[in-house]
Image (cartoon, rainbow, N blue to C red):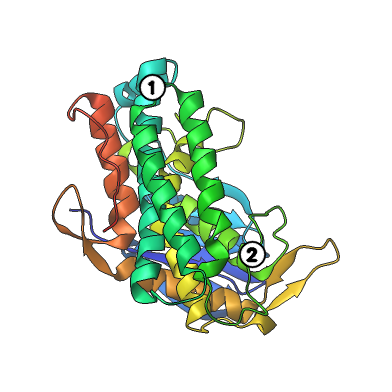
Amino acid sequence: MKQLLNTLYVTTQGAYLAKDGEAIAVRVEQELKLRVPIHTLSSVVCFGQVSCSPFAMNLCAESGVGLAFLTEHGQFLARVEGPVSGNVLLRRAQYRWADLPDQSAAVARAVTLGKVANCRTVLQRALREKPDADGAEELGKAADRLGHLVDTIARASEVDAIRGHEGDAARVYFGVFDHLITASKEDFFFRGRNRRPPLDNMNALLSFVYTLLTHDVTAALEGVGLDPAVGFLHRDRPGRPGLGLDLVEELRPVLADRLVLSLVNRRQVQGSGFRRTESGGVVMDDATRKEVLVAYQKRKQEEMVHPFLQERVAYGLVPHVQALLLARYIRGDLDGYPSFLWR
């Protein structure tokens, strides 16, 4: 099993990344703040005004460490990658599958089933934890509706139909999402999904963690030799990691939504940590962003029994495992793609 390595998040504005032997050195105003051996890292994510020397980029590329640049508030800018890994025959098979309706539908159906089933589990867990909470009846009805949609999606044979059912499931799930928020309701509420920019604190949190998860999934796909840009549920669009977004769909209820809800309901983040910009968007301050990053890293270190492998796996390795299983399916080593189904 692949070892879970660290992700280095650099949020200090004006920081500079340099190569220091076989390590990445982080300097601020020429003062060394941190030195991290390259063999302990899986990726480096830079937020805002963070620069990197060409030699540090080369060290990351040679070591298979992904290097990503985001805006200060988490919007993706660019990635720097080394040589493409994996077998070119796998990528050629992936491209052929993307053009074949039946194969595309098979993968799209699997990831959508995973997403809807995991959304249902999020609602059911909330009901078990607080069966008498406000909105329990609405949560129960939504969970039942998602259960019916799972059966409907399992019978769908065309990608367009699967997309339609996925949209229905998203409306049901997000329609009751506000009931999952049980603390600081004056600062954290959900009236619908909005982004680019997010218009409230909850959407700002969700968008930020979704960006982190998309980075991890994209890196995992590249690591097993698949092309993150060529998806099955999300079709090709310049600059969009279609296959990355496919796998994010099934993972985000577990790795993103639950984390965001925990941060809010346990009052680990406060409304004072958010501000509204002139454009109307809502962004986090530095302290809140760091709190979220620390919580995300801790979540990735927690372990669970993978539903298909039946082995203990860190949550941070789930994107790699799912990417590997998808690659095995496309190569013909598996009869189907086993979605990640959270219990």
| Element type at mark 2 | helix
Q: Residue at 55%, 55% (x, y): give it.
A: 174
Seen at 68% across and 84% down, the residue is: 272
Locate residue 295: give its quadrant.
Answer: bottom left
Query: Visible in this render: residue 222?
Result: no
Quarter of the view holding residue 184: bottom right
Residue 49: which disc? none
- Lower sequence index among marks 2 and 1: 1
Question: Mark 1 falls on what kind of element?
Answer: loop
Badge 2 crowding class, 10 Å Cα cut-off, few under 14, some 14 to 19, many 20 or more, is many
Question: Image check: 308 left or right of 97?
Answer: left
Q: Residue at label 2?
A: 204
Residue 14, position in %: x, y?
67, 71
Q: Is residue 128 above or below residue 111?
A: below
329, 141: nearer the viewer: 141
**237 left or right of 150 in image:** right
> Residue type at mark 2?
Ala
From this view, report whether residue 316 is shown above or below residue 32.
above
Residue 88, x across and y down, in percent: 33, 24
Identify the residue at horizontal 34%, vertical 27% (top origin): 155
Counting from the top left corner in percent of width and height, residue 157 is at: 38, 22
Q: Is residue 57 left or right of residue 40?
A: right
Looking at the rendered structure, the kind of residue marked 1 is Ser
In the image, residue 275 lies at what x, y percent? 74, 75
| Residue occupied by mark 1 | 157
Residue 70 drawn above or below residue 103: below
- Relative depth, front residue between 25 and 297: 297
